[in-house]
Image: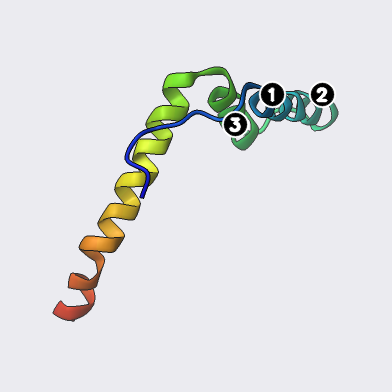
């Protein structure tokens, strides 16, 4: 598992942000698109989201089996 955050390419982030803006212009705002826009606009948000996913994966690999063993 990758232990260090590596940000996505700028072009990819810009393209995703434009997708969100186009969607909102056509359909209006929804919370899911607002969250993705926030992800696109903040390096810290992307980094924290990545760290959260790493922690979830680490828990699943190291602790989730205990719940099944106890049952």
Marks 1/2 in contact by CB < 8 Å: the verdict is no
The image's colouring method is rainbow
Q: Nearer the viewer, residue 21 or 59?
A: 59
Marks 3/1 in contact by CB < 8 Å: the verdict is no
Mark drawn on residue 36: 3
Q: Earlier along the polypeptide chain: callout 1 or callout 2? A: 1
Q: Earlier along the polypeptide chain: callout 2 or callout 3? A: 2
Residue lying furthest left in this view?
Answer: 70
Marks 2/3 in contact by CB < 8 Å: the verdict is no
Which residue is located at x 41 percent, y 37 percent? 50
Would you place residue 14 above or below residue 52 in this image? above
Nearest to the eye among marks 2 and 3: give it: 3
Q: Nearer the viewer, residue 4 or 21?
A: 4
Left or right of 11 on screen, residue 4? left
Q: What is the CA distance from the residue labelled 1 to the residue labelled 2? A: 21 Å
Write down the residue under mark 2.
25
Q: What is the CA distance from the residue labelled 3 to the residue labelled 1? A: 15 Å
Which residue is located at x 54 percent, y 27 percent? 39
Kind of element beneath mark 3: helix
Q: Residues within 10 Å of mark 1 (few under 14, many from 20)?
A: few
Q: Position of residue 67 (x, y in %)?
A: 21, 72
Q: Position of residue 61 (x, y in %)?
A: 28, 62
**In which quadrant of the rendered view does residue 15 lie?**
top right
Q: Residues within 10 Å of mark 2 (few under 14, many from 20)?
A: few
Would you place residue 34 above or below residue 58 in this image? above
**In which quadrant of the rendered view does residue 51 lie?**
top left
**In which quadrant of the rendered view does residue 19 lie?**
top right
Write down the residue under mark 1.
11
Q: Position of residue 16 (x, y in %)?
A: 69, 30
Nearest to the eye among marks 3 and 1: give it: 1
Kind of element beneath mark 2: helix
Kind of element beneath mark 1: helix
């Amino acid at each position: 598992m990758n232990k260090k955050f590596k940000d996505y390419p700028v072009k990819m982030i810009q393209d995703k942000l434009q997708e969100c803006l186009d969607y909102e212009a056509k359909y209006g705002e929804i919370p899911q698109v607002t969250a993705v826009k926030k992800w696109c606009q903040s390096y810290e948000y992307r980094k924290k989201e990545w760290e959260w996913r790493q922690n979830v994966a680490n828990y699943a690999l190291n602790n989730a089996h205990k719940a099944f063993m106890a049952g």
